[in-house]
Image (cartoon, coloured by chain):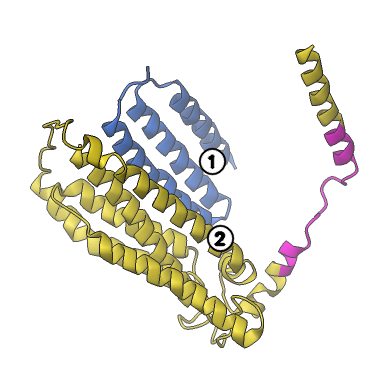
Chain colours: A yellow, B blue
Amino acid sequence: MRAFVSFSVLALIVVGLALSLSHIPFGTDRMQVGNYYLDHGVADTGASNIVTAVVLNYRALDTLGEVTVLFIASLGLGVFLSWPKKKEGTQEEGKRELPEASLIVRRGSQFLFPLIILFGGYIFLHGHLTPGGGFQGGSVIASAFLLMFLGNNAYRLRHTPLTVTESLAGITFVVVGLIGLGVGGYFLNNFLPKGNMFSLFSAGVIPILYSAIGLKVGAELSGIVANMFESRSER
Amino acid sequence: MIYIAILTVAMLVAGLAAYFFRDLIAAVVACAAVSLIASVLFYLLHAPDVAMAEAAIGAGLTTAIFVIAIRKTGRYEK
């Protein structure tokens, strides 16, 4: 009986989907908004990277939501990993300290660390000109911290600067949006002048917002990596 | 075009390997291979923004976080 009911519900859904899909003409554009972005995006925003123009101008509010989701995930991981520390932190005293990495790995990671940070900063500062942006640059920065953790056993990250950076970046994003609300009438309005195309200081508020996102994502992902490593060494 | 087909097949093989491996470290490496091939595919399909995000997050950070988590727990699937 239950199988019959579930099969008939399934058949009903399949028939309904097929009927409704048969009314949609196949092979034609159903969305005209993408063509609008491609035609007018550069002139509207001044950003030569159309993806950035969509992410930080037309759909900037969604990006704020995305950053918030990442923040909540990082917060949840931090809470989860620090939860059982007081109860069982000492009883599982496994003496398996990792052997120190070789000199080449240690020095190599220390040499590459500032270069990778620089590359991440380049990616998010040029987010409106070239492919990439805040999320990509932030994750590159976090991978630099990951390299330091992997190469050096004694490497520890202080959490206070990370938290301060992340909070300031988030506040910057919201404050820029609120200034746009005050000046232009809607949240995250691009109120600064567009400037010359293909120059670093162009596209209005987009470089500011992407720098804020890059720092925030970098700090959050570095915090996640640091939390994972530190929780391992305390067991 | 032929590259895209080869890469897609390799991605499917890596995904199946990730499902069938009992050694979790090997499964995580297979997942990283899926992400890496996906990133190359995104690049070939003219989506460099997504390719960068996939390479940095999918192939890099996620793999590292999974490996740390496996070190903390158990290596072999029961």
The amino acid type found where label 2 is placed reads Gly
Task: Pinpoint residue A114: horizontal percent, then vertical percent.
Answer: 24, 64
Q: Examine the image and state in which quarter residue A187 appears.
A: bottom right
**Viewport quadrant of the N terminus of chain B:** top right
- How many labels, in total? 2
Q: Does the magenta stretch include residue B5?
A: no
Name the mark on residue A65: 2
From the viewer's perspective, is residue A99 above or below residue B47?
above
Give neighbour class at mark 1: few <14, some 14-19, many 20+ (Cα, 10 Å): few
Asked whether disc 2 touches disc 1, contact meaning CB atoms under 8 Å apart, the reply is no
Give neighbour class at mark 2: few <14, some 14-19, many 20+ (Cα, 10 Å): few
Parent chain of label 1: B
The amino acid type found where label 1 is placed reads Tyr
Q: Examine the image and state in which quarter residue A118 appears.
A: bottom left
Which residue bears the numbered disc 1?
A: B3
Task: Pinpoint residue A113: horizontal percent, then vertical percent.
Answer: 23, 60
Residue at point 83%, 35% (across, down): A17
Q: Give the label, 2 or 1, closer to the camera.
A: 2
* Secondary structure of the residue carrying numbered label 2: helix
Q: What range is drawn magenta here?
A: A16-36
Task: Pinpoint residue A184: horizontal percent, then vertical percent.
Answer: 64, 85
